[in-house]
Amino acid sequence: MKSFKILFVVPSLSKGGAASGARNLLTALQTQNVEIIVVEAANHQSRFSKLFRFIERLFDHFFFNSNIHFFKFFKASIDLRQLITIHSPDVVQLCNISGNLVDYSYYTEGMPVVFHRMSDFWPYKGCQHYYKEDGRLEKVNRWFYFMHSFELLIQANRVAPSRWLINELSDNKVFQSQIDFIPNAVSLGGSITVKDPALSLVKFGFISTDLNDERKGLKRMLSLVDHENFELHLFGAGNTSDLSLDHCKVITHGRFEGGDLSHVFSNFDILLCPSLYDNSPNVVLEAMSFGIPVIGSIDTGMESYITAGTGHLFDFASGSKAMFYNLVTEVIDCYPSYRESCLAHVEKFSPENIGASYLELYNLKTHRSKKR
């Protein structure tokens, strides 16, 4: 298998929810016999570009109360063609990165083969996915493809980290190319002091970059955990003063960066992921790598990761409190077994295995490209 020179383009390896997936992919590729040139868009912008990106975010938040990357008032921050000329890579690996940062409007014959790891729905669903039932965004989406051109991504090889995402995009009329499934990578977690929990006190964890992000579903699950024997640990930024809980104790830990996560996962017994429209949160595998079971939303990308013995899939939108309590009881009663199953399960998602899967895909697609 040939050695590859990879141009790895990412918004940031430290900020935002997508940074975790990008770091894990980078770690996976570094286990292989490849040369990697890492370009973080956050570090490759002129002051002028940064100013316009800031203004664009202000407009996004003013009109839509979210950073949906709809407005673009100035050229993209990164000139991908220039980077390709400078580094002459064999492949270009894009992580989740908006059209404000990279110009997707051009594609020329002879370019290196481009791969896009889809950790988000932008641009495939436009801005509508941020609040799926928001009628305003449905109308805005009609203008979305007039604001941005995606010729490069139309020609790119797309990689989805969940089968659910592939199904979600199967009827997309703009992007018709095949989508390959390669799951997220995760390194084995460190050791944490584990004491088998009891139903007399169950500690739940909830992790989100922004605790107030409606897509993550914190407020949606509050009635389920409002029990005198439950304790809720929140990790992330945001105002939690309006959380209405009568019985459950809430402990906020603030935001944390990547690195050693043992100080995070040692605080709770079960991770809760109540997102209703989520591709594949990296935190699911990160929790399992420390032996922490996960209860996540049905009909999301978590179905590719949560299996029997590692946690449960639950309908946080309409599931009853009794059903939720029964699932929690089952996990707590068999906690040592769940912990062992989690640790065994994550081995298949090791950086070595996922890195090898990407390299196999690189070989396949570049070989086909040369034959044309």
Image (cartoon, helix red, strand yellow):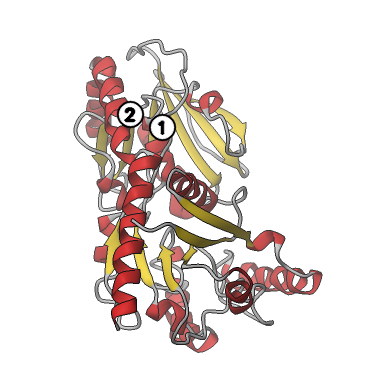
Mark linked to residue 13: none
Query: Picture quarter containing residue 268?
Result: top left
Q: Residues within 10 Å of mark 1 (few under 14, many from 20)?
A: many
Quadrant of residue 49 within the rendered picture: bottom right
Amino acid type of the residue tagged 2 in the rendering: Pro
- Distance between the Cα atoms at labels 2 and 1? 7 Å
In x, y percent, where is residue 31?
A: 44, 43
* Quadrant location, the N terminus: bottom left
Q: Say whether marks 2 and 1 touch (CB < 8 Å).
A: yes
Report if residue 234 is visible in the image: yes
Residue highlighted by disc 1: 287
- Image spot of residue 102 (x, y percent): 58, 73
Instruction: State the residue in front, 231 or 120.
Output: 120
Who's the residue at 22% across and 37% down the image?
307
For disc 2, the marked residue is 293
Question: Residue at 43% across / 71% down in the picture?
Answer: 114
Q: Which callout, 2 or 1, points at the residue further toward the start of the chain?
A: 1
Is residue 206 shown left or right of residue 335? right
Label 2: which secondary element: loop
